[in-house]
Image (cartoon, rainbow, N blue to C red):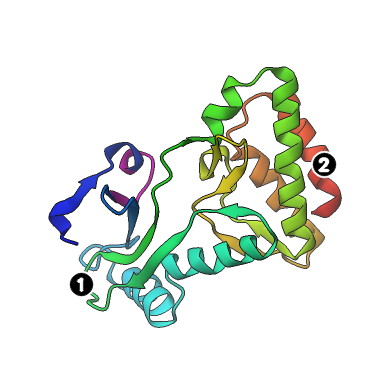
Amino acid sequence: MSWHDLEPMSLLDSQSISHFYVQAESGTLFKLVCDKYSPKEHFWRWLGRDIISKRLAGSYDARKEFTSRRILKQLGQHTVEVRCYGVALNFLNPLGSLYAMEHMQDCVTGSAYFEALDEAGRYAFIETLSLQIIQLAEAGYYHRDLHLDNLLVDNQQRLIWIDTHIKALPASSQKRTALLENMLTNSRIENAAYRAQLHERLEPYF
């Protein structure tokens, strides 16, 4: 495969700090994660976070995403097939890590799917979403960046998790409550009634 075979995904780029490319022949979507800091503008932050904490300590985004996907898959939840992942060995390369996955073409984002549903369908969707979040919480984890655009819905109405960043639930009840509130705020569910339904279902587990 040559880099000349890759087509930029400008729409995905506009919604993320990462860069996306698709290779049509293999049906592979490549996600290139940028360093958060520049060595010229914020040298010590770049060295501490992007180089030492992430690349040298093995806590880079692609690896965390792969590990998170494995947890979800063990729980029987649907995720995108991973082709490979890796980290940049050249510290001056601002693209810190690479994550290659199946390009899911016959799916829509959770936001688009939710908006197209009628009221009964939206309540049913919230219930399905809640059950998967509860299952994850019972295993001791939560989605660090849970919102409707971080999941897809296929033509069988299955939820497929993308941009999977899973973290262990904190022991502190205060921190867990704050996590739940943050989750609801960032969910991209605008209607208060649907957010209230999600809150009611999740509260006993946070």
**Quadrant of the rendering where the N terminus is positioned:** bottom left
Neighbourhood count class around disc 2 (C-alpha, 10 Å): few under 14, some 14–19, many 20 upward: some
122 left or right of 99 in image? right
- Cα distance, mark 2 to mark 1? 46 Å
Q: Is residue 65 above or below residue 196?
A: below
Image quadrant of residue 126?
A: top right
Asked if the residues shown at circle 2 and circle 1 are in contact, with their CB atoms under 8 angstroms apart, the answer is: no
Q: Is residue 150 above or below residue 32?
A: above
SS type, badge 2: helix
Q: Residue furthest right?
A: 204
Mark 2 = which residue? 201
Mark 1 = which residue? 92
SS type, badge 1: loop
Which percent across, then down, holds residue 170? Answer: 72, 66
In the image, which is nearer the foreground, mark 2 or mark 1? 2
Disc number placed over residue 124 in the picture, else none: none
Image quadrant of residue 28?
A: bottom left
Residue type, mark 2 in image: Arg
Which percent across, then down, holds residue 200? Answer: 83, 38
Q: Residue at x 39, y 48 (%)?
A: 103
